[in-house]
Image (cartoon, rainbow, N blue to C red):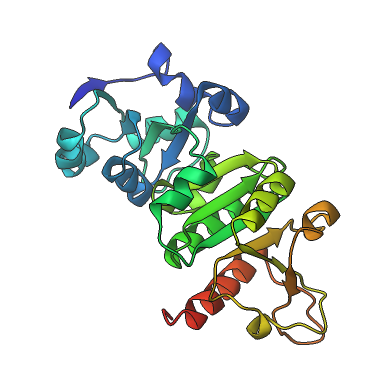
Amino acid sequence: MFTVDRIDSLDLPQLQPYRTMRRQHEHRQQGIFVAEGEKVVRRLLESGFEVVSLLIPEKWLIELEPLLRARKEEIRVFLADKKLLESMTGFSMYQGLLAVGRIPPKPTLAEIVSRFRRPYLFAALDGLSSAENTGAVVRNCAAFGVHALLVSETCSSPFLRRAVRSSMGTVFQLPIIEGVKLTETLAWLRAQGVHCIAAHPHIEQRKLSQANFVSDCCILLGSEGYGISPAVMELCQDAVAIPMAARVDSLNVSAAAAVFLFEANRQRGKA
């Protein structure tokens, strides 16, 4: 269900999230996020996430109408000229589609574990500061069948606008628990028999292919500058590195995630 309003300004109270896209802390306090781009907005409409509103050029209404009609909640659709949208939002939009969704309640790890059959495959992020990197890791996790992504309290949120965009909307498909205390969470996983494996660029003795990803495991990925924190590292039962040329000491965290998850799938016969 949806209603349509044609606008020529962002003065309506319902458009406040679009006026404040650069103040994302306010969005987090309200439990909402902004999705942008055709593919991301489509995936939001196809998902189980609650959709609050859309802000789009009129030409997109016909294309999105079947998805809008299939929704159960009442969605406000605001129509405006693309140039006007760019002048109101303050940046250039390639496709001119924006939407506001609501962040779902955070699941517990026990709930997620009960949904899947063993062997489990989890990934965890420790201290990532870049929203784009967080979003790219989300996309990799969805691509390689990760059962859940654990995002530490020291990480950039996967529901920031740039993270949602970088994930290409796969953030709506992947179970995510954010704001976790990794030391407590890893201790709980270990008690369930989950093997915690650290992605560590400076391990010389242990290479990626030597790690066991066949049984229940959780892959730990550290921050862009400092890697995995010592407290988290202490709880990892294994630490391995991706073999690479001597003059290159590390990969971007999203690239490292893709390599680790591919190896996990290869060992499980899914690659």
Q: Residue 128 location in percent, x, y?
A: 70, 51
Vertical comparison of 100 with 141: above or below: above
Q: Residue 251 location in percent, x, y?
A: 70, 71
Q: Is residue 254 left or right of residue 207?
A: left
Q: In percent of the image, x 68 and y 61: which residue is there?
A: 221
Q: In percent of the image, x 35 and y 40: which residue is there?
A: 97
Vertical comparison of 216 with 232: above or below: below
Q: Is residue 169 visible?
A: no
Which residue in the rendered view is the most extreme toward the bottom?
Answer: 245
Vertical comparison of 100 with 217: above or below: above
Q: Residue 50 location in percent, x, y?
A: 34, 31
Q: Residue 106 location in percent, x, y?
A: 50, 36
**The N terminus: image quadrant:** top left
Q: Is residue 152 left or right of residue 99?
A: right
Which residue in the rendered view is the most extreme toward the right?
Answer: 230
Q: In percent of the image, x 42 and y 12: which residue is there?
A: 13
**The C terminus: image quadrant:** bottom left
Residue 210, located in which quarter of the rendered image?
Answer: bottom right
Vertical comparison of 15 with 86: above or below: above
Q: How many marks?
A: 0
Q: Is residue 17 visible?
A: yes
Q: Is residue 26 left or right of residue 208?
A: left
